[in-house]
Amino acid sequence: MRNIEAENLQETLEELIVLGSKWTVSKKGIHTCHREYLTPLAKVSRNP
């Protein structure tokens, strides 16, 4: 999701997350959460 501007991040997250989900912010400023908190459930891609 590199094409999301910082000022639109909150709006984007409100569309994707389940209320009460917990996010982790890394030292580099990367936001992550468990996929079960996303709506719809995110698919996990696995690289061979």
Image: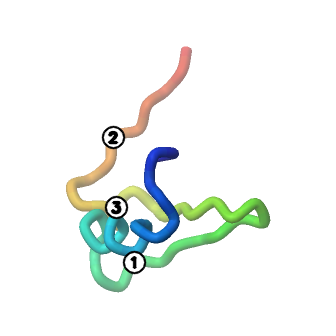
Q: CA distance from mark 2 to mark 1?
A: 17 Å
List the single residue furthest toward the right.
Answer: 27
Instruction: Give whichever of discs 2 and 3 has the lower sequence position.
Output: 3
List the single residue furthest toward the top.
Answer: 48
The image quarter in which residue 17 lies:
bottom left
Relative image position of residue 22 (x, y in whole percent) = 48, 78
Instruction: Give whichever of discs 2 and 1 has the lower sequence position.
Output: 1
Number of dots carrying numbers: 3
Nearest-to-viewer mark from 3 and 1 = 1
Does 29 sit left or right of 7 as displayed?
right
Does the residue at mark 2 contact the one at mark 1 (Cβ under 8 Å)? Answer: no
Dot 3 amino acid type: Glu
The residue carrying pointer 1 sits among few (fewer than 14), some (14 to 19) or many (20 or more) residues within 10 Å by Cα, namely few
Dot 1 amino acid type: Ser
Instruction: Give whichever of discs 3 and 1 has the lower sequence position.
Output: 1
Does the residue at mark 2 contact the one at mark 3 (Cβ under 8 Å)? Answer: no
- Residue that label 3 marks: 36
Q: CA distance from mark 3 to mark 1?
A: 9 Å
- Residue that label 2 marks: 43
Query: Of the numbered discs in the image, which one, if any, rests on residue 21?
Result: 1
Does 40 sit left or right of 27 as displayed?
left
Does 28 sit left or right of 15 as displayed?
right
Relative image position of residue 8 (x, y in whole percent) = 40, 67
Identify the residue at image location x=57%, y=64%.
31
Identify the residue at image location x=52%, y=73%.
23
- Looking at the picture, does residue 11 appear above or below residue 43? below
Identify the residue at image location x=51%, y=45%.
2
Dot 3 falls on a residue whose secondary structure is helix
Q: Nearer the viewer, residue 29 or 43?
A: 29
